[in-house]
Image (cartoon, rainbow, N blue to C red):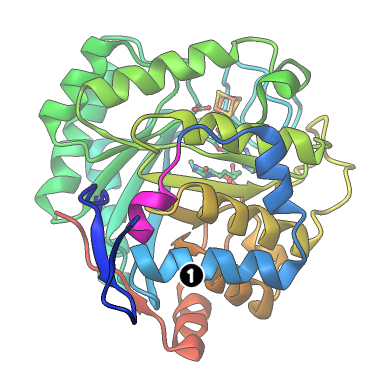
């Protein structure tokens, strides 16, 4: 990642005196944001917030590059956790039926198709509370090796991990692990009762210690307050270093989940959330994640202008829909944006 140089830059002013000037990037990387400061950003006049986010975005990233990541659910449904948003929880009656785990060949076919369509990262998801050692985990390790052999970045999201399991994923070639904080520490219990916020942080530590990139973000539109949103960003920005990727999802309201009847996220709130994440974590990839099917092209482009530089690409997320590849290629073309090359 492009971590900043900490060497002070010296600039000459008009009278030839010298004064040290904090480099923009170094000044921008902070891990001590407070909720009040985050909220101060979130509630700035919209154009001022976007201006600040854009300036940091272009200082740290290609201004017109967007990472394309494709998701595949390798083990769908029947999850013992009770996450209120999730159609795969066995606590809710949704139209997602539990399925057997996919075999390696089916996953590699999907990965090949994703690569042919232009994706550079392939993320495999399992509806598990945690990884259990044994044949299913061995199969995931085989999938990771296979995805890597295709020249794609490999990512997994499998629930909680021990440090040893994280190490084995690293040895198989895993580039990134997705494990979201999802909401603020205070709001966590109202969304999930079967695990704790601290358990989430502990898996993120295991991932980091194994040398795997951290992908962690959350969901808006679950009835949380603005302080909850800001507090989640503060927690993410406390991680050292910041997560390499920060997915920001808008709740996909799935029939049969306890959150099905909530109102949709106001698109401008989505833009504010992305922009605030960009300002607080300037060198991270910020991913405009679930919820794009309900956003206009213009809102998606504004999110990208305000700091989003990664999307899920492909007509499915895990169990719900996403804009199709043709539509997304057209969207990027409209903006003159380019897919980001894989970081291999
Ligand atoms: N079971 C693993 C876990 O929870 O970490 C991995 C898969 S889980 C489906 C991955 C993430 O998908 C969740 O943390 C959540 O952020 C996101 N997600 C699930 N259902 C969603 C929904 N209806 N809307 C938006 N995001 C959702
Ligand atoms: C993330 O933050 N969003 C993705 C990915 N990480 C695994 C998942 C979105 C899931 C949306 C609901 C579904 O399709 O099941
Ligand atoms: Fe299970 Fe993950 Fe869905 Fe929670 S979010 S119910 S842990 S699949």
The residue shown at (24%, 20%) is 209
Residue 302 at what x, y percent from top left?
62, 74
Q: Secondary structure at mark 1?
A: helix
Quadrant of the rendered image containing residue 111: bottom left
Q: Main secondary structure of the magenta part?
A: helix
Q: Position of residue 211 (x, y in %)?
A: 20, 29
Viewed as shown, does residue 13 lie left or right of 198?
A: left
The image quadrant where one finds the C terminus is bottom left
Asked if residue 63 can be seen in this view, the reply is: yes
Place of residue 134 in the rendered image (x, y in percent of width and height, measured from the top left): 25, 10
Q: Nearer the viewer, residue 78 or 253?
A: 253
| Residue 317 visible in rendering | no
Query: Is residue 27 inside the magenta stretch?
Result: yes
Q: What residue is rendered at 9% in x and 49% in y?
A: 149
Q: Is residue 150 above or below residue 195?
A: below
Residue depicted at 81% across the width and 59% down the height: 266
Residue identified by numbered label 1:
55
Name above or below for residue 296 compared with residue 204: below
| Nearest the eye: 340 or 106 | 340
In the foreground, 245 or 139: 245
Residue 208 image position (x, y, % from top left): 28, 26
Q: Quadrant of ligand 2?
A: top right
Residue bounds of the magenta highlight: 23-30
Label 1 CB less than 8 angstroms from ligand 2: no
Residue at point 58% right, 22% down?
78
């Amino acid at each position: 990642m492009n971590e900043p140089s900490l060497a002070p830059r010296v600039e000459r002013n008009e009278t030839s005196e010298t004064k040290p000037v904090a480099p923009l990037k170094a000044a921008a990387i902070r891990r001590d944001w407070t909720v009040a400061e985050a909220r101060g950003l979130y509630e700035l006049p919209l154009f001022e917030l976007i201006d600040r986010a854009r300036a940091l975005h272009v200082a740290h990233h290609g201004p017109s590059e967007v990472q394309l990541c494709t998701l595949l659910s390798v083990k769908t449904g029947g999850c013992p956790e009770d996450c209120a948003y999730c159609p795969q929880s066995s606590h809710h009656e949704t139209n997602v039926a539990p399925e057997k785990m996919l075999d390696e060949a089916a996953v590699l076919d999907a990965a090949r198709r994703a690569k042919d369509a232009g994706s550079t990262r392939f993320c495999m998801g399992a509806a598990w509370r945690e990884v259990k050692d044994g044949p299913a985990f061995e199969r995931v390790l085989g999938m990771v090796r296979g995805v890597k052999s295709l020249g794609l970045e490999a990512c997994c999201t499998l629930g909680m991990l021990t440090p040893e399991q994280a190490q084995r994923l690293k040895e198989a070639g895993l580039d990134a692990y997705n494990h979201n904080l999802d909401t603020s520490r205070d709001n966590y219990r109202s969304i999930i009762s079967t695990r704790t916020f601290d358990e989430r942080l502990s898996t993120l530590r295991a991932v980091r210690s194994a040398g795997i990139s951290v992908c962690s973000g959350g969901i808006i539109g679950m009835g949380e307050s603005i302080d909850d949103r800001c507090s989640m960003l503060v927690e993410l920005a406390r991680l050292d270093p910041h997560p390499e990727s920060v997915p920001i999802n808008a709740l996909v309201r799935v029939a049969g989940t306890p959150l099905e009847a909530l109102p949709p996220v106001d698109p401008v709130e989505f833009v504010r959330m992305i922009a605030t994440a960009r300002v607080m974590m300037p060198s991270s990839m910020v991913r405009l994640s679930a919820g794009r099917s309900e956003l206009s092209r213009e809102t998606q482009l504004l999110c990208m202008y305000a700091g989003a530089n990664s999307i899920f690409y492909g007509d499915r997320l895990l169990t719900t829909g996403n804009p199709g590849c043709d539509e997304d290629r057209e969207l990027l073309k409209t903006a003159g944006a380019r897919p980001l090359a894989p970081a291999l």
